[in-house]
Amino acid sequence: MKLNARHVIIFLLLILLSVAFAFGFDAASTAVERRQYPQPKELADSVKQASQEHGIPEAILWATLCTGSDFASNHVSDSGEIGLMQLTPAQFDFICTELWGKEPMDAGMLYDPDTNLQAGSAYLSYLYTRYGVWEQVFAAYASDTETVNAWLSDPAYVSPQGVLKDIPDARVAAYVKDMTQAVELYTKLYYQS
């Protein structure tokens, strides 16, 4: 079959439409993802400051805020975690005494967004220093260090490299999965050039 000018023009138009559709679809997809994984302006400065002070990537802080409390400073979970970063009063006592070297503060301070964000960031930093693998940090954040240490000492849950590969607690496993996905999306949406 011999191609004439009309066929060539139609072919080129189809290619241009395909490219335009692909770019449009990608932009629409990104817009939807940004609505699911936002960065509320009122928290931006506090997140940046906490990230710098505690050496936690901003994407991880945003993921923690989104996954745990959906940015609600007054959120209380069924298991008693409070505020933006979803900390328990016991975790807050540990942060105050062990990480900040202060007297324990009233758990009501967990409703203060800046206090909660600073405390949660300090705790994430502590856990990362302890475990060095973000998935293990997320597991300890959602449960506690004793539980994660027990899992790490059981060969059934650990890879040959000594990394937690299976989490036997469904709630903690779901949290780690959600956090890992949120971190990947925050990184893709806001922190990749």
Image: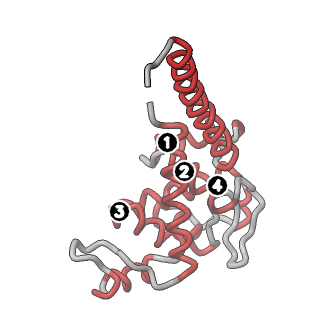
Which residue in the structure is indicated by mark 1?
188
Q: In this view, does 161 lie above or below 43?
A: below
Categorize mark 3 by other alpha carbons within 10 Å: few (<14), some (14-19), many (20+): few
Farthest residue in the top direction?
A: 5
- How far from the left and from the top, in percent, is residue 25? 62, 37
Image quadrant holding the N terminus, namely top left
Q: Is mark 1 on a helix, strand or loop?
A: helix
Instruction: Specify few, some or many for label 2: CA neighbours under 10 Å numbering under 14, 14-19, or 20 or more.
Output: many
The numbered mark, 2 or 1, whose residue comes first in the sequence reads: 2
Tell me where residue 49 appears, x and y as whole percent.
54, 39
Q: Residues within 10 Å of mark 4 (few under 14, many from 20)?
A: many
Q: Which colour scheme is used?
A: secondary structure
Q: Which amino acid type is shown beneath numbered disc 3? A: Val
Q: Which of label 2 and label 1 is nearer to you?
A: 1
Q: Name the residue under label 2.
A: 61
Camera-nearest residue between 32 and 137: 32
Q: How far apart are marks 3 and 1 (CA)?
A: 20 Å
Q: Earlier in the sequence, mark 4 or mark 2?
A: 2
